Image (cartoon, rainbow, N blue to C red):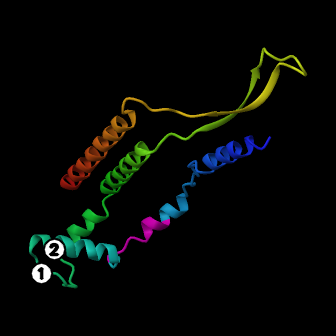
Amino acid sequence: MYRSVPAFAAALALLAACASYHPAPISAAAGAHALEARTLDNPRLERFIAAAQSLNGAKAGTRRWGLAKLTLAAVYYHPELDIARTKLAAARAGVTAARQIPNPSLDFGITYNGTTTVPSPWTVGPLVNFILETFGKRGYRTAEARALADAARDDLASATWQV
């Protein structure tokens, strides 16, 4: 009886460490509000313009909106870049997921023990399933995810160039 307590505690500790996914609903009203909230006095937009101007050697700190600054604002708010950034974020999340060890699962199954007949050879008990990865499968999966992240980064660069 007391020998099974540490095994049961270890199984509970393993199950408590499992990652889980909680979906978040998409709100059309929140999306419309975010679209309407786009302004030219956005602090992130100002940092983007300052960084772009410093890369080009232009004089930063000008409060006047000319063609160059409006063009940078159009690039910053362009929807294709948002799509490409989202794809890059998803690809980076895929790298994180590819590095993870698969979670064990807990099932309750019916087992048959042919050596006993009292009270019944059939029992219902917990079954803990562990996935053993062999031959570097996690490394291959991670390398594939990194390649997809690199491709998404290149897609973002292409979308930026096209915009």
Q: Mark 1 or 2 closer to N-term?
A: 2
Q: Which residue is mark 2?
A: 53
Q: Are marks 1 and 2 in contact (CB under 8 Å)?
A: yes
What residue is shown at x 34% (from left), y 78% (from top)? 43
Magenta-tinted stretch: 33-40
Q: Position of residue 17 (x, y in %)?
A: 58, 51
**111 and 18: which one is in front?**
111
**39 and 121: which one is in front?**
121
Q: Residues within 10 Å of mark 2 (few under 14, many from 20)?
A: some
The image quadrant of residue 139 is: top left
Question: Disc count in the image?
Answer: 2
Q: Position of residue 20 (x, y in %)?
A: 58, 49
- The amino acid pointed to by label 2 is Gln
Residue 162 is a magenta residue: no
- The amino acid pointed to by label 1 is Lys
Residue 18 sits above or below residue 104 on the image: below
Q: Which mark is residue 142?
A: none
Horizontal placement of 90 versus 128: left or right? Answer: left
State how far apart marks 1 and 2 are (Cα).
7 Å
